[in-house]
């Protein structure tokens, strides 16, 4: 049996929420660049499954056939053309986890089987809820359907936080969310994504955006993944309906990661802002993710 099917794999974290909640913006933040299209109106993209490796993009059509395409062409793909897009990028976050950027949950143009195929593959979620209309009924309903399938606790990200202009409004929304989602999430993190994405080397802006606390939380979960797994769930899933691309590099990286994490030799990383003004919109900025040894070492 090939190693790819037997070796341990990385956690798979999906970004979910209503359309335009900021899922792709948050994915871009974690990737340290802007490889994914972001727009005001709902995108028509199927799930985008992003793994570590040399830059490579392919779409998987509804017959299961694959077709390579340039990263810049992503914005032209629609769920009509593909059930899934697989992306490989050399971003450091992807050394710890695969990310899956999902379509918006209430988008009437998304066929229901989009969810059926991909959700069994997902280990945990970053649920993005926009601060002006946080945690709508549709979100709570969707969440209650899928929460029991997750292998590790999800995190709630309160995006568009910059749109709450007064401290009173901010406190009110946070208090309501705290009450309405009590015990459901591993944490609630307010974020202003444009501020975080544009922070560059401005540490104060990075901290003010909320990205500082959120990234620290996420990295902490990923580095101590085994201790976050929910007890009722077996560590490895059954045969997958959609298989992630597994390259030799992935397999070697998986094994190295597992060994390192087990022996607590891997150093915690923190995603840092990319230098202002440098990124090309269609290219990731892998080197902008600098490793940084923090005091989190356990
Ligand atoms: N002010 C502000 N705008 C944001 C924030 N997050 C996202 N946006 C903007 O909201 C719009 C939608 O963002 P996306 O990241 O494309 O949202 P999405 O959830 O991926 O959207 P779909 O894929 O269409 O469901 C874009 O114009 C973003 O720039 C935020 O925290 N604050
Ligand atoms: Mg999106």
Image (cartoon, rainbow, N blue to C red):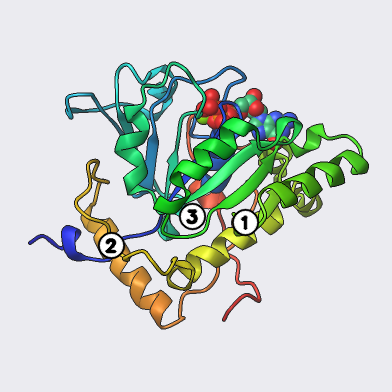
Q: Residue at x 29, y 69 (%)?
A: 255
Q: Which numbered disc, 1 or 3, marks the residue that appears first in the sequence?
A: 3
Mark 1 — residue?
Answer: 215
Q: Residues within 10 Å of mark 2 (few under 14, many from 20)?
A: few
Residue 231, placed above or below residue 50: below
Q: Residue at x 53, y 53 (%)?
A: 154
Q: Are marks 1 and 3 in contact (CB under 8 Å)?
A: no
Dot label at residue 28: none
- Between 177 and 276, which is closer to the camera in this rendering? 177
Percent of width and height locating residue 101: 46, 37
Mark 3 — residue?
Answer: 93
The answer for how far apart the CA atoms under marks 2 and 3 are is 21 Å
Q: Which numbered disc, 1 or 2, marks the residue that appears first in the sequence?
A: 1
Residue 117, placed above or below residue 152: above
Mark 2 — residue?
Answer: 236
Percent of width and height locating residue 18: 57, 30
Q: Are marks 2 and 3 in contact (CB under 8 Å)?
A: no
Percent of width and height locating residue 115: 37, 34
Residue, far left = 1
The answer for how far apart the CA atoms under marks 1 and 3 are is 10 Å
Q: Nearer the viewer, mark 1 or mark 2?
A: 2
């Amino acid at each position: 049996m090939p190693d790819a099917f037997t070796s341990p794999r990385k956690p798979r974290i999906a970004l979910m929420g209503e359309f335009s909640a900021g899922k792709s913006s948050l994915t871009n933040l974690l990737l340290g660049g802007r490889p994914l299209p972001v727009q005001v109106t709902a995108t028509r993209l199927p799930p985008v499954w992003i793994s570590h490796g040399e830059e490579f993009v392919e779409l998987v059509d509804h017959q299961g056939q694959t077709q390579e395409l340039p990263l810049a062409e992503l914005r032209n793909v629609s769920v009509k053309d593909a059930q899934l897009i697989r992306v490989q990028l050399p971003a450091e976050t992807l050394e710890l986890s695969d990310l899956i950027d999902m379509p918006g949950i209430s988008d009437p143009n998304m066929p229901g089987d989009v969810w059926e195929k991909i959700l069994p593959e997902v280990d945990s979620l970053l649920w993005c809820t926009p601060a002006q209309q946080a945690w709508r009924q549709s979100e709570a309903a969707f969440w209650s359907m899928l929460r029991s399938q997750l292998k590790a606790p999800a995190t709630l990200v309160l995006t568009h936080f910059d749109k709450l202009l007064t401290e009173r409004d901010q406190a009110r929304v946070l208090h309501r969310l705290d009450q309405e989602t009590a015990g459901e999430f591993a944490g609630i993190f307010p974020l202003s994504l444009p501020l975080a994405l544009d922070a560059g080397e401005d540490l104060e802006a990075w901290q003010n955006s909320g990205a500082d606390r959120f990234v620290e939380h996420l990295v902490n979960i990923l580095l101590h993944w085994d201790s976050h797994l929910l007890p009722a769930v077996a560590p490895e899933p059954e045969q997958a309906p959609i298989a992630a691309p597994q390259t030799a590099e992935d397999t070697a990286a998986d094994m190295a990661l597992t060994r390192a994490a087990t022996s607590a030799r891997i150093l915690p990383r923190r995603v840092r802002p990319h230098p202002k003004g440098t990124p090309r919109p269609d290219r990731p900025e892998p080197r902008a993710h600098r490793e940084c040894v923090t005091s989190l070492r356990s």
